[in-house]
């Protein structure tokens, strides 16, 4: 019977609770991952954040980081407004919302010796896509739904 240690990914990238959502989004893109543990400044595990949490947040502008094209600007709207009015209407691309604001504070964790079937039941029951493997409260690995699919592929 396989254990978590047999299938876990040992390289786990964590994110800081104080990161902006823009930084989180870029991190997920750069690392090609869909979720990560959230840690404080002392690397204490606080929770987990995923692209689902990011998508639920309405603070990221779909055009953040991109210049608006002329065809998005209606000159009729701007004609009756002063420069001060236009500044008040501008949407900032950086938001005050941080990872800590959108993360899930509940952490699903298992020990390295746990068997894969137990982890599968935990993931199904909790409707989660990743379980963190801990040793003395420190994250030493992660088991994702992709890892579980690899196990199923080995049996067929």
Image (cartoon, rainbow, N blue to C red):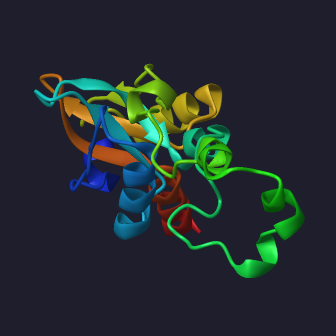
Image coordinates of residue 7 in percent, x first then y, are 34, 54
Image coordinates of residue 142 in percent, x first then y, are 33, 46
Q: Nearer the viewer, residue 156 or 44?
A: 44
Mark yes or no: residue 1 visible: no
Quadrant position of the C terminus in the picture: bottom right
Quadrant position of the N terminus in the picture: top left
Name the residue furthest bottom: 70
Residue 71 in which image quadrant = bottom right
Q: Nearer the viewer, residue 25 or 61?
A: 61
Name the residue furthest top: 106
Residue that appears at 78% across and 69% down: 73
Residue that appears at 83% across and 53% down: 80
Residue that appears at 22% across and 53% down: 10
Mark yes or no: residue 125 visible: yes
Image coordinates of residue 25 in percent, x first then y, are 46, 55
Q: Is residue 152 left or right of residue 12?
A: right
Name the residue furthest right: 76
């Amino acid at each position: 019977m396989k254990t978590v240690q047999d299938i876990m990914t040992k390289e786990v990238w964590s994110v800081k609770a104080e990161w902006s959502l823009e930084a989180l989004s870029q991190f997920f893109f750069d690392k090609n991952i869909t979720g990560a543990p959230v840690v404080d400044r002392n690397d204490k595990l606080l929770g987990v954040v995923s692209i689902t949490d990011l998508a639920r947040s309405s603070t990221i502008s779909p055009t953040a980081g991109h210049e608006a094209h002329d065809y998005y600007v209606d000159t009729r709207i701007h004609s009756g407004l002063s420069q001060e009015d236009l500044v008040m209407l501008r949407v900032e691309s950086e938001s005050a919302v941080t990872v800590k604001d959108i993360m899930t504070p509940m952490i699903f964790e298992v020990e390295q010796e746990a068997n894969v079937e137990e982890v599968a039941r935990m993931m199904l029951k909790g409707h989660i896509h990743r379980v963190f493997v801990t040793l003395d409260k420190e994250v030493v690995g992660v088991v994702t739904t992709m890892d579980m699919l690899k196990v199923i592929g080995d049996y067929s």
